[in-house]
């Protein structure tokens, strides 16, 4: 494992795995000898975004109805949680069954406000700072996202057969534009906020639905900077 640091840059790491590369050894040395590896460090530019106030999973027993979620606080909007502004809405579909009766659940996310939504970008996985420096403008955004986890069991014996899931891809970040205020005359955005979701996790147990959103939120309106402080 290689780990590189430098003042003014985010640390980065990589590895040289001769076995995975299919190389052999000779005379006590891996071949080829003197192998070179290039590691690019990402500079620290102008950190402004703030990590959301996540203190573990948020739970709810409300299923099959849309709940508002605050990215800044990482929580459902009051009265379902401590959030204040609904950046997006989330709907959980689950029949409440667990154990051998469990067949799966799904999570739908939508941005109902005009011009709000998100887009995926690839993370730089080798870097300490993996996400995007800023929200790209202009860009095509999506307003609906869907994740699920399903299990298939024998209808008679209830024995487990297979599991299928589509969860948040941790190698990508979801860049979000929300809290949009629109000029009624020009139909253009006059005010909005940008954030970067780095992971979404969900599950269900005896307490209901467990939901976790990890993100960085820029509190300054119209500032596309998403580099975390």
Image (spheres, rainbow, N blue to C red):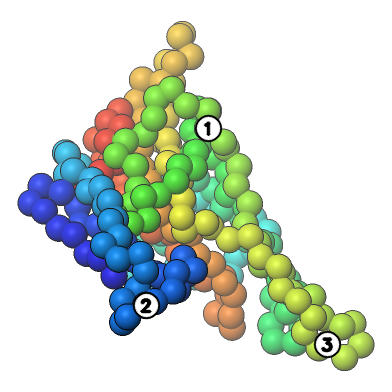
> Which element carries disc 1, helix, strand or loop?
loop
Q: CA distance from mark 1 to mark 2?
A: 53 Å
N-terminal of the pair, mark 2 or mark 3, is: 2
Name the residue rendered at 69%, 82% in the picture. 98
Asked if residue 117 is positioned above or below residue 91 in the image, the reply reads above
Name the residue rendered at 30%, 66% in the picture. 33
> Which element carries disc 3, helix, strand or loop?
loop
Q: Position of residue 134 (x, y in %)?
A: 32, 36
Seen from the viewer's position, the closer of residues 209 and 155 is 155
Which residue in the rendered view is the most extreme toward the right? 156
Name the residue rendered at 58%, 80% in the picture. 205
Does residue 223 show up? yes
Does residue 84 show up? no
* Mark carried by residue 141: 1
Asked if residue 33 is positioned above or below residue 153 in the image, the reply reads above
- Residue count near mark 3 (Cα–Cα under 10 Å), binned few <14, some 14–19, many ≥20: few
Q: Which quadrant holds residue 73?
A: bottom left
Question: Which callout, 2 or 3, points to the residue nearer the camera?
Answer: 2
> Which element carries disc 2, helix, strand or loop?
strand
Seen from the viewer's position, the closer of residues 89 and 33 is 33
Asked if residue 201 is positioned above or below residue 119 in the image, the reply reads below
Seen from the viewer's position, the closer of residues 166 and 17 is 17
Query: Which residue position is annotated with label 3?
Result: 158
* Mark carried by residue 5: none
Q: Position of residue 83 (x, y in %)?
A: 38, 54
How many marks do you count on the picture?
3
The quarter in which the N terminus is drawn is bottom left
* Mark carried by residue 26: 2
Q: CA distance from mark 1 to mark 3?
A: 42 Å
Q: Position of residue 154 (x, y in %)?
A: 87, 83
Left or right: residue 182 compared with residue 102 = left
């Amino acid at each position: 494992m290689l780990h590189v640091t430098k003042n003014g840059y985010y640390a980065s790491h990589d590895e040289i795995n001769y076995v995975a590369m299919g190389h052999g050894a000779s005379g006590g040395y891996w071949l080829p000898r003197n192998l070179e590896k290039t590691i690019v460090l990402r500079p620290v530019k102008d950190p402004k975004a703030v990590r959301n106030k996540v203190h573990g999973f948020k739970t709810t027993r409300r299923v099959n109805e849309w709940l508002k979620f605050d990215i800044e606080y990482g929580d459902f909007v009051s009265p379902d949680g401590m959030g204040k502004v609904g950046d997006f809405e989330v709907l959980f579909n689950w029949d409440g069954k667990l154990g051998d009766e469990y067949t799966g659940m799904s999570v739908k996310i939508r941005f109902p406000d005009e011009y709000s939504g998100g887009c995926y970008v690839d993370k730089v996985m080798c870097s300490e700072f993996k996400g995007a420096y800023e929200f790209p403008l202009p860009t095509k955004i999506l307003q609906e996202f869907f994740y699920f986890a399903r299990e298939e069991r024998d209808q008679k014996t209830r024995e487990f057969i297979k599991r299928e899931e589509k969860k948040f891809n941790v190698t990508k970040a979801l860049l979000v534009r929300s809290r949009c205020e629109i000029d009624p005359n020009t139909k253009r955005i006059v005010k909005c906020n940008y954030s970067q979701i780095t992971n979404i996790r969900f599950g269900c147990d005896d307490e209901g639905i467990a939901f976790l959103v990890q993100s960085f939120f820029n509190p300054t309106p119209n500032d596309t900077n998403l580099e975390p402080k």
